[in-house]
Amino acid sequence: MSKLTTIWTYIRQHKYLITIVTFLVIIVFLDENSLIQRAKYQQEINELTNEIEKYRKQYEEDTEKLKELTNNPEAMEKIAREKYLMKKPNEDIFIFEE
């Protein structure tokens, strides 16, 4: 009984400290919306925001290229020659590989 009494006395003397420590452990580690989980979610949000910005830039660049292709037939010819290796009749193509 002596040990039990000693433990009970310690708990009674430090009840506020024990309550606060228990509360902090629950908030930081154990809760479904713990601070650790919130930090992970914030990091994921930042990564997705950066990805959205990357795709938005790519969309704008592709839109500009598409406008140029529809308005400028010389640009279309240039892409056809470079990317698809198309040529005019009686024309030779030389491909250089690095």
Image (cartoon, rainbow, N blue to C red):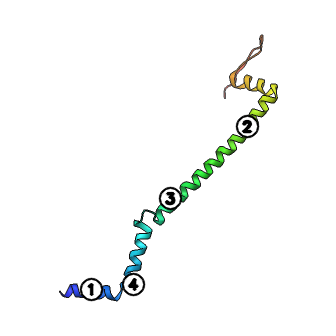
Q: Nearer the viewer, residue 84 or 12?
A: 12
Residue that label 2 marks: 63
- Name the image quarter holding the C terminus: top right
N-terminal of the pair, mark 3 or mark 2, is 3
Locate residue 73, reporting x and y percent: 81, 25
Residue at image coords 59%, 55% = 46
Tell me the residue that label 1 is attached to.
Answer: 8
- Rendering quarter of residue 7: bottom left
Tell me the SS state at disc 2. Answer: helix
Q: Residue furthest front?
A: 32
Indicate the amino acid at tag 1: Trp
Residue at (31%, 85%) from the top-left corner? 11
> In the image, what residue type sits under mark 3?
Lys
Q: Amino acid at mark 2?
A: Thr
Numbered disc in front, either 4 or 3: 4
Classify mark 3: helix, strand or loop. Answer: helix
Cα gap from disc 4 to disc 2, whole angstroms: 63 Å
For marks 2 and 1, give the CA distance: 73 Å
Q: Which mark is residue 16?
A: 4
Kind of residue indicated by mark 4:
Tyr
Task: Quickly name the residue at label 3.
Answer: 40
Q: Who comes first in sequence, dot 4 or dot 2? A: 4
As drawn, 51 above or below 24? above
Whether 85 is drawn above or below 27: the answer is above
